Amino acid sequence: MIHTNALQFKYPDAGMLGFRDISLLTGEQGLIKGMSGSGKTTLLHLLSGILTPESGTILIDNVPVNKLSGQQKDLFRAKNIGLIFQRNLFIQSVSMYQNMLLAQGVAHSGADKEILIEIFEELDIGNLSNKKPHHLSQGEQQRFSIARALVNKPKVILADEPTSSLDNANCLKFTQMLKGVCEKYNITLLIATHDSRLEQQFNCVIEINESK
Amino acid sequence: MNIIKLAFAQLSGKPLQSLLSIALFALGLSVVSALLHFERQTQFQFHNNLAGIDLVVGAKGSPLQLILSSVLHADNPTGNIPLHEAERISRNPMVKATIPIALGDNYLGYRIVGTTLDYAALYDAELQTGDWYKHSMEVVMGAVAAQRTGQKTSDVFTGVHGFMEHGHSHDDHPYTVSGVLKPTGTIIDRLILTPLESVWEVHEHNHDECEDPHCEHHHEHGHNGEKGEMAIILEKVEKQEDLSARELNLYNQHMGELSIATNSEQEITSLLVFYNTPMAAVMLPRMINDNTSMQAASPAMELNRLMGLLGFGMDVIRGLAWIITLFSGINIMILLWSSLSREVHELALLRSLGTSRAKAFMLLLTEGTMLATCGWIVSLIITRITGTVLAANSDWLALSAMQTILPEEMLMLIYAILVGIAAALLPAIKAYRTDIHYLLQKL
């Protein structure tokens, strides 16, 4: 599902950054490990088409992401990649439900309310969906972050340091939940983190620092 | 959720700032729009009220005052002119037609105008109820005057001397309403029309009351019984002797017929003149001003002069209004810019969800356009409410004219949208260029 080959990224004002090749099969769950500032976020942004690599190839679902135009990348990302950020980001002026619809709208897939209800049930947040983001706790917002990553039935979910602000209990709960839904919907999951608590839960751990 | 819904949600998410921006923008546009309406109303009023009157002849004094008093009925008259002098102008071959105007009294602030029925025809006035006046002391009321005073056909009222609502009342000379006119949207709506003879009759009796010795000769006629007097009058008419004003009135009343008398003692306030030939515009005013004790003034020229004076003030207000609009445009820009700075992570989120740069750009433009369009709509509402309130309290404003959207106001909508786009342009470019990688990394 995710394959990279000899990926290199050039920072505008710094040197070149090379990345170790990654290969994840459909439904596989992997962890990218590395210190802060080692380029984990950069790698995720390369995979999701937010950044463009200097050289090398990225194949996601057999699509060469690095060859797409800016607009094609945006649409590809909307349709195929669910992103989870370090902080919970929502449009504050609208309800959680509308935040979900917004994500569907961006992917031009039209509102699919059935899948929303299903996901809300899965994550046990259906009764919160009419609230606005600032009325929810961090934990609740995090569950909506997972929900939003799922609404377009993506092939891949990329999560960037999702657990860094969570305590041990919540960290475990969150990881279990994320792994659970990805297994259920057969989504390939890749988490970038420096959080060592996650390591024992993943079989596939990729150290990023080695190939710097 | 599409862009328009999202833009609306983003703006209503900060209601105070958005409303302030809209209010400020609306204020500027309202002033411009109110000026447009004011200009249109005055031009409309002037144009309609001039009704093709070429020249006004009245007593010497300020020409503008003469026009204001005799055409727009908005000022006191300059004085009176003898009827026989006015008659001479009427007989001038360059003159097509004339209409005499005799002012003097009012009823509850509405002027009682002694004139001929030609005056009503001048403004295409039609009867709503009742009949045209046939006799002295009968009046036909303009629509507004009738409505505001509550007078109906065959009601009776007494006039008050002068042009103020309160003053000496001519209690012994009641007027009878013979008819009420349909609204015309012109000055005639606010007038009470009566035969010239009524005005003469009322004021002749005024002289009776005065203690001036040379007035006394009127008493002889005044206290005779009408029946007996009529016989004397008819006798005089047969012998083709001169009649006094009162006798003529009684005669006219008796005959059910009106005509302008040529009695040398009779006076009118002014004479509205219509030219026969364009030459008259050059010849007639000079002739009258140089050779008679009267003055001639052209309504068109005097009103242009007046508009010229008003025009400067209006230009200043208009300039101010545009400045307000400009600054409110800048205010919209600051609002969009500062909220974009605060919500830049939301923009990064939208972009990372797959919203294209172009759409992020459009989102900001939509927000700006939305604010400006709301401002325009609010300005329409403000001017309509103000117009309705003003029209309800003023006889001078026609309400119907406020209810249409002027073509200039549609132009203002385009201007408003352009301002909205211009104000949103810088923030939109900022949104377009946003580096989401950089923003997300710094979370």
Image (cartoon, rainbow, N blue to C red):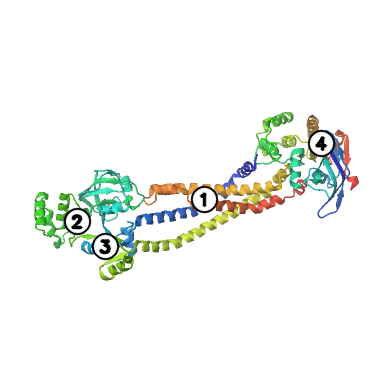
The residue sitting at 82% across, 52% down in the picture is: A11
Q: Secondary structure at mark 4?
A: strand
Q: Are marks 4 and 3 in contact (CB under 8 Å)?
A: no
Q: Position of residue B162 (x, y in %)?
A: 27, 56
Mark 1 vs mark 3: in front:
1
Q: Label 3 crowding class (10 Å Cα cut-off): few <14, some 14-19, many 20+? A: some
Q: Are marks 2 and 3 in contact (CB under 8 Å)?
A: no
Report, in whole angstroms, how far the alpha carbon at label 4 lies from the one at label 1. Answer: 55 Å
In the picture, the quarter occupied by the N terminus of chain A is top right
Q: Is residue B52 left or right of residue B249?
A: right
Q: Secondary structure at mark 3?
A: loop
Report, in whole angstroms, how far the alpha carbon at label 1 lies from the one at label 3. Answer: 47 Å
- The residue indicated by pointer 1 is B410
- The residue indicated by pointer 3 is B79
Which mark sits nearer the N-terminus, 1 or 2?
2
Front residue (pair B331, B383): B383
Q: Are marks 4 and 3 on the same chain?
A: no
**Picture quadrant where residue B113 is located:** bottom left
- The residue indicated by pointer 2 is B206
Question: Chain letter of disc 2?
Answer: B
Q: Are marks 1 and 2 in contact (CB under 8 Å)?
A: no
**Picture quadrant where residue B262 is located:** bottom left
Question: Chain letter of disc 3?
Answer: B
Front residue (pair B298, B111): B298
> Could one spot residue A87 in this view of the protein?
no
Report, in whole angstroms, how far the alpha carbon at label 4 lies from the one at label 2. Answer: 107 Å
- The residue indicated by pointer 4 is A189
**Picture quadrant where residue A124 is located:** top right
Report, in whole angstroms, how far the alpha carbon at label 4 lies from the one at label 3. Answer: 99 Å
Three-letter code, disc 2? Asn
